[in-house]
Amino acid sequence: MTRYLIVGLGNIGAEYVHTRHNIGFDVVDRFCEVHGGIFTMGRLAEVAEVKWKGRLFVCIKPTTYMNLSGKAFKYWMDKEKVAIENSLTIVDDLALPLSKIRLRPSGSDAGHNGLKDIQATLATDKYPKLRFGIGNNYPKGMQVDFVLARWTKEEQPIVNQKIDKCVEVIENFSTEGIEKAMNAINSVEFV
């Protein structure tokens, strides 16, 4: 059974629930909801297992806070013996508009503290990432407030649509490979 590590990035604590910065948690929650995975508290992360189409998905939501995400990622990747190319990290991205999702086999941390820590821990940026565009509609100097805020009423329908699409992307990533999954999603505009 091929094993996958699905890593949703976010921060623990009620004040962070459903914020832009926690979209990784929301996507992984939805994936597990669709496929019957139940989260339990594990070492450095909440963990759920999903079996689907002969594949095993180990889904984690690190409990280390965002800027120590690498610790949980590496621990679960090693423990579950998942090849790095079979990992998928779901993360919010300020550089992408709300209308976009981008899947990549590698790439820089783009200033994201969670990705920065994973990259430092793994000593490579060559691990797949699913970037969830959150846009950058905030006044100068207000970036932190923006990423830690909840979605607006106007944004929520697109966000819900994208979360469901991300579930499909995770499935395609595992069944068709990253190239085909990228071709299917990277040019899609959500409105």
Image (cartoon, rainbow, N blue to C red):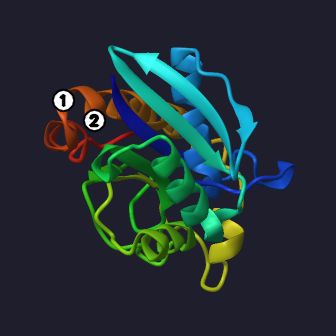
For the image, the number of numbered tags is 2
**Left or right: residue 46 compared with residue 132:** right
Residue depicted at x 63% and y 71%: 67
Secondary element under disc 1, as helix, strand or loop, is: helix
Compared with residue 66, is residue 105 higher up or lower down, i.e. above or below?
above
The reply to whether dot 2 and dot 1 touch (C-beta < 8 Å) is yes
Q: Quadrant of the N terminus?
A: top left
Residue depicted at x 60% and y 84%: 140
Q: Nearer the viewer, residue 185 or 180?
A: 180
Outermost residue, right side: 14
Residue depicted at x 46% and y 77%: 120
Q: Which mark is residue 84?
A: none
Secondary element under disc 2, as helix, strand or loop, is: helix
Q: Nearer the viewer, residue 91 or 35?
A: 35
Q: Is residue 86 visible?
A: yes
Q: Position of residue 98 (x, y in %)?
A: 45, 52
Q: Kindly identify which residue carries mark 2.
A: 173
Q: Which mark is residue 176?
A: 1
* Residue type pointed to by label 2: Phe
* Residue type pointed to by label 1: Glu
Q: Residue 71 sits in which quadrant?
A: bottom right
Q: Position of residue 104 (x, y in %)?
A: 26, 55
**Left or right: residue 81 compared with residue 139:** left
Residue depicted at x 48% and y 67%: 118
